[in-house]
Image (cartoon, coloured by chain):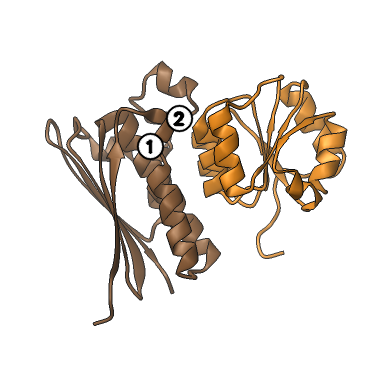
């Protein structure tokens, strides 16, 4: 079994300005590992969307990125309000974001669909009142 | 088109990363919604926007963009400029409105979409 690299981040939910910091760092780390640019871009965008969601909807959370020989895995875990209807949330254009969030350039209802679009595998486990766990994988080969 | 040409065409001021002015870019996009940029942009290397917050820079960084043009005389904050410097993204600012800025660049050959792997 080859070595798995792990990067862990605590995502601050109080500060919209710093949202995306973890994704920028992951992008840098993956560049250093010499992964193909297209893979790096897909991982970064998927994670960035997830991180933004965590900050605007869930008050922050934890992010882990595992790099194996086969794929890059992103695990996002929060203790936010949860998603009532995941199927509905996956539809492009559906959003529960406030006007304030839209004025910041987000909340167009593209976050979750984008995460799915840029990853090869995505699983959402969510319980209302408890939180949401999202697993995404981007295959390297 | 060189980023320097964009600067001239839009009569824009350089905010940071002057070193990147000689870079060539082949397509651009314009939006105030970063969600849409993340959803629809493919290889566009230039983002035109009237939105001013750190996520504009991070979005451009995620999309491997080379240049951001702030329209309608909007100016980035000091924190945004630092983020752009870290990522080597050229920041320009023009007094032109979005529609006009996009029209000028488009009519001078900077298209909206470019097929990949070309």
Nearest the viewer among A79 and B117 is A79
Secondary structure, mark 1, is helix
Pointer 2 chain: A
Which residue is at a point 65% across and 60% down the rendered structure image?
A: B116
Left or right side of B7 for B46: left
Q: Is residue A103 above or below residue B90?
A: above
Q: Residue furthest top?
A: A99
Q: Is residue A122 above or below residue B118?
A: above
Give the percent coordinates (x, y) of residue A63. 28, 49
Q: Earlier in the sequence, mark 2 or mark 1?
A: 1
> Which quadrant holds residue B48?
top right
Report the quarter where the C terminus of chain B lies.
bottom right
Left or right side of A69 for A33: right
Give the percent coordinates (x, y) of residue B97. 74, 21
Disc 2 to disc 1, C-alpha distance: 8 Å
Label 1: how many Cα within 10 Å (few below 14, some 14–19, many 20+): many
The chain displayed brown equals A
Residue to which mark 2 is pinned: A106
Same chain for labels 2 and 1? Say yes or no.
yes
Residue to which mark 1 is pinned: A52
Q: Is residue B109 visible?
A: yes
The chain displayed orange equals B
Nearest the viewer among A42 and A11 is A11
Secondary structure, mark 2, is loop
Q: Is residue B41 above or below residue B35?
A: below
> Which quadrant holds residue A122?
bottom left
Q: Is residue A112 visible?
A: no
Q: Are marks 2 and 1 in contact (CB under 8 Å)?
A: yes
Give the percent coordinates (x, y) of residue A134. 25, 49
Give the percent coordinates (x, y) of residue B108. 87, 40
């Amino acid at each position: 079994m080859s070595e798995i690299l792990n990067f862990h981040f605590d995502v601050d939910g109080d500060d919209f300005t710093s949202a995306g910091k973890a994704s920028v760092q992951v992008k840098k780390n993956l560049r250093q590992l010499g992964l193909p640019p297209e893979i790096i871009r897909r991982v970064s965008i998927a994670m960035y969307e997830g991180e933004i969601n965590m900050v605007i909807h869930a008050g922050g959370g934890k992010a882990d990125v595992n790099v194996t020989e086969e794929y890059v895995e992103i695990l996002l875990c929060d203790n936010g309000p949860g998603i009532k209807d995941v199927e509905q949330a996956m539809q492009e254009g559906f959003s529960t974001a406030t006007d304030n969030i839209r004025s910041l350039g987000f909340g167009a209802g593209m976050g979750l669909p984008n995460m799915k679009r840029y990853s090869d595998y995505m699983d959402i486990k969510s319980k209302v009142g408890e939180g949401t766990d999202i697993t995404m994988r981007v295959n390297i080969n | 088109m060189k980023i320097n040409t964009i600067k001239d065409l839009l009569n824009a001021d350089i905010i940071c990363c002057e070193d990147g002015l000689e870079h060539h870019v082949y397509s651009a996009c314009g939006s105030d919604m970063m969600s849409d940029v993340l959803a629809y942009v493919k290889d566009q290397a230039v983002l035109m926007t009237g939105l001013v917050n750190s996520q504009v820079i991070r979005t451009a960084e995620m999309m491997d963009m080379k240049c951001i043009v702030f329209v309608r005389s909007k100016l980035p904050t000091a924190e945004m400029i630092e983020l752009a410097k870290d990522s080597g993204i050229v920041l320009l600012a023009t007094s032109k409105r979005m529609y006009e800025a996009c029209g000028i660049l488009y009519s001078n050959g900077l298209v909206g979409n470019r097929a990949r792997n070309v």
